[in-house]
Amino acid sequence: MNYLQLAFGFFLLVAGGEGLVRGAVSAANRLGVSPLLIGLTLVGFGTSTPELVTSLQAALNGLPGIAVGNVVGSNIANILLILGVAAIISPITVARSGFGRDGAALAISTLLCVGVVLHGALDRWLGGVLIAALATYLVVTYLTDRSDTPDLAASTSPTLGPLWLAITMILGGIAMTIFGARLAVDAAVTLALLWGMSETVVGLTIVAVGTSLPELVTSVMAALRREPAIAFGNVVGSNIYNILGILGITALVRPIAVPAQIAQFDVWLMAAATLALIIAVVPWQRIGRSIGLAFISAYTGYTAWLVTFA
């Protein structure tokens, strides 16, 4: 029964995230913004809704391992697994000008996350700092996108359906992800006890990958449609929002301690994955199939290590 609940929860997460993304992209196209801005904001943040409700639910239930591990694990999965799969399907070309802004924001967000984890607790004042950083990033992104790429909106896909339908899809997607996240967290905790695994390991693996499925679906679809800006922006925007938005909101709602296990290894792997992404993009401005394969191999090894030794 727990397996069915976990599977159904993940199904709702994926379906809700898909509806949310479709509605968000449709609404954004009507407003006339670039594909990269869509990927960084509405798509990236929209696909992070499962992580948000999952971490909040876990924090309110007194499960800091899942609350923090979900964010760290999702960011690792986003770079190594999701970008890896997308790059194998279709190599991702990245504009150096845009990545200068967003890569810097991702690096700063990652450093803030490392600092929070080493601090050992998600305090409310830290939550305020993270939310303020997110607000600053959003304003800078909007202003620079409007000034640097004024004509890109015309190249976006045509909007299908009226605006009210897009809003309905957004609201329906949010509702499905909230319910799906609750089912997934409850089932994951029960299964962790049955398997003899710690809640932190479950948060870093099962829950993290499950809540990252909307990002995976979105990036794979974008890669298949030869939309590298959306595929790449989805992951970068999601990772920034996971740290600044999800950890920030979680800290404001329910301050929690950070499990020592995450500080010992996992947050450093997240930082290493972020650094690897920056190193891959800056010199060559692309993520090719060989790098994608290396990312997937690294994630496979990490997951195997967690299940075996953690």
Image (cartoon, helix red, strand yellow):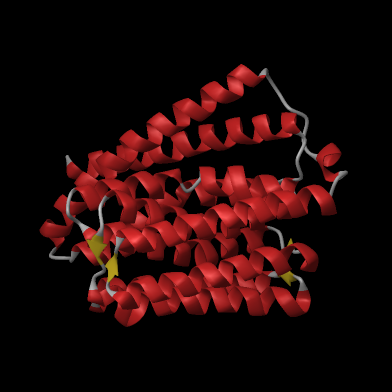
Q: Position of residue 203 (x, y in %)?
A: 29, 60
Q: State whether residue 238 appears in this view.
A: no
Please give the name of the residue rendered at 61% of the width and 51% of the height, measured from the top-left corner: 138
Q: For this view, does 53 lie left or right of residue 152? A: left
Q: Position of residue 205 (x, y in %)?
A: 33, 62
Q: For this view, does 32 lie left or right of residue 87? A: right
Image position of 137 with respect to 11: above or below: below
Q: In which quadrant of the rendered view does residue 64 lie?
A: bottom left
Which quadrant does the C terminus fall into? bottom left
Which quadrant does the N terminus fall into? top left
Image position of 144 with respect to 301: above or below: above
Please give the name of the residue rendered at 67% of the width and 17% of the height, measured from the top-left corner: 162
Q: In which quadrant of the rendered view does residue 161 lie?
A: top right
Of 134 and 35, nearer the camera is 134
Q: Position of residue 27 (x, y in %)?
A: 66, 30
Q: For this view, does 196 lie left or right of residue 3? A: left
Q: For this view, does 209 lie left or right of residue 102? A: left
Image position of 111 with respect to 67: above or below: below
Q: Position of residue 164 (x, y in %)?
A: 60, 17
Please give the name of the residue rendered at 79% of the width and 66% of the height, measured from the top-left corner: 97
Q: In which quadrant of the rendered view does residue 2 lie?
A: top left
Of 164 and 138, nearer the camera is 138
> Which residue is outermost to the right?
151
Please give the name of the residue rendered at 44% of the width and 61% of the height, measured from the top-left corner: 129
Of 75 and 219, nearer the camera is 75
Of 41 and 184, nearer the camera is 41
